[in-house]
Amino acid sequence: MKLNRVLFTAIIASLFLYSCATDYAGYEENADSWGFTAPTAHTIEKNKAFAEKLALDNIQDFEDAGRGLIAVPENLTIMGDDGEVLRNMEEFAFLEADEIPSSVNPSLWRQARLNNIHGLFEVTPGIYQVRGFDISNMTIINGKTGWIIVDTLTTRETGAAAIAFARENLDSRPISAIVYTHSHIDHFGGVLGIISSEDAARENVRVIAPEGFMKESTSENIMAGTAMSRRAVYQFGKDLPVSERGYVDTGLGSRLPFGTYGILAPTDNVDQTPQEMIIDGVKFVFQYTPESEAPAELAFYLPDFKAYCGAEILTHNMHNLYTLRGTKTRDALKWSGYIDEAIDLFPDAEIFFASHHWPIWGKDRVRDFLEKQRDLYKFMHDQTLRLANNGYTPREIAEQIVLPEALDKEFYNRGYYGTLSHNSKAVYQHYLGWYDGNPANLNPLPPEASALYYVAYMGGVDNVLDMASKSFENGEYRWVAEVLNHVVFAEPGNKKARMLLAKTYDQLGYQAESGVWRSVYLSAAYELRHGAPEKGFSLSKARELLKRTPPERFFDTISVRLNGPGAEGKQMVINVNFTDLGENHVLSLKNAVLQHKPAALDPDADVTLEITYDLFIRILIGEAGLRETIFSDDLNVSGSRMDLLQFLMLLEKPDNNFNLIEP
């Protein structure tokens, strides 16, 4: 059935094509080569005032971040197989300047400098960390026969570079075990860079992870992956130049690499607290912390070292209860409860270390840190609900909620990654949803339609631009962004509106204490000037991860790509038999909904596809071309050609570069 193969391959592959963007580049006097304008007098004054309210001369964090330094790489540059630079710490040399640039919030500047301290560090004899090779840390624990690796970084390339640097400066012990603290890719994606799947199996390497790890790690972002990946470009400033007017830091770490991702399945699961294990001669006491910072997460205590690893429920910043790339909201009360549990379970802890940032030493300092991070999340939870119960809406709550001085003064509670503003909205969303109770917000017009009314009511585009320019000169940037957003949605090709909005986002980015807020604002400014990027994330780099993703997750994705209106009135049944997995899935289209389940072959199916899972994945990510697939022995199609064609035509092509800042 060669025709069936052509149609199947062409349409499935087309789901992952990218679109090109229009260039709106515009430059002004004092703009840098990327078009980012100079900070205004209002921004300079605001950042100066911000600096005056913080103890920026406190050097404790810098002493901790540099403590135990063993070695610094002479030139930390990590390349991908395709020649793309994944990590180049020389780009961040500008952070060593004596004077804080007025285009960066002084508090974020301090955090960026701390995250820029990189190398191999001794936490305590027997525990080491490689920091700065990635957004996250790799922790190395000496076992009886080899190294126990805690978190393997984001990509194969950064994981390989980190383990090679450790071996260069410590010794060449084998890897005896791996611990994944949680199901986010920056903590497991680099595992195949430190050991191959073949070596891990042959050497019986233990892989310990929280219960549900494989489900969560392989399913995260699958169904909403296109939207999340597009928004992640903004959150992580993927396309921003590294500079004092561009990308500076995420707050959580230096920069997220976009390389090749992999995974190894766990051999041991943690599903209770406390749960003791002896791993290569080292005693671990695990704390099971699901539905906190990640759906599947664990922390642990090492009693022989009196060291507590807080994974990512504890970091040197306020974390996200909701990430700007888009996630389900996180449970602040449960999160705070896990930290409180750790205080009770491990009162003898004298060392704290985590999956990001730098350690803390001293029993009193560790306890103080845990207590104040615990109270940070509890305060956000309790006070948001107090205000909600008094009738305040999310925007009103975000505008007035303020941390008490005892929490606010601690740099590790500052909003470098999450913010009090969007975290309070996340708490509201968690309990009360998107509707604020005001009927005017129950069924509002979509942005493009309402923009036309707003602009008309305000006297037309020219009048709005004139008034917005005056507001810009007065430093009213939040309002200017709000009103010009209507103009751009009403007239997306209006260059004057785009450039003024871009200048506005420049200033909001320069003032932001949050690294991700800065990246979001500046990414918007970049795209207003230059258009959207020509391509999004490459799925081919996640091939090893996707191969270990259960087929059901891909069928979930296909289900949400079904054009419901187009499918109305159509019915069909399709068998998809994965010959190399020995399993069959039955897809049923009815009532404009695609259902799927593992089941025996349906003898009455309209179409049956026999395909290897490997080829299925390679087609999805674009590795298998038409010619290869047509003549492949790994694909056979039987049944109605027209039904197959009709079904495939109902699957929409996702756009990884859809507009965020215009219709």
Image: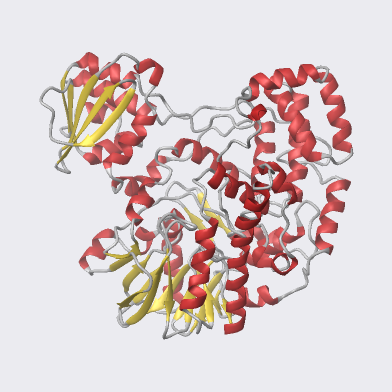
Which residue is drawn at the image coordinates 68% and 24% (left, top)?
489
Which residue is drawn at the image coordinates 21% and 66% (left, top)?
202
Q: Quadrant of the C terminus?
A: top right
The answer to whether residue 330 is seen in the rendering is yes
**214 on left or right of 494:** left
**293 on left or right of 400:** left
| Residue 79 location (% of width, % of height) | 48, 54
Q: Is residue 59 above or below residue 439?
A: below
| Residue 249 location (% of width, % of height) | 64, 55
Which residue is drawn at the image coordinates 58% and 59% (left, top)?
252
Residue most toward the left? 603
| Residue 422 location (% of width, % of height) | 64, 48
Residue closest to the eye, 276 or 166: 276
The answer to whether residue 241 is seen in the rendering is no
The quarter of the displayed image where residue 446 is located: top right
Q: Is residue 33 above or below residue 423?
A: above
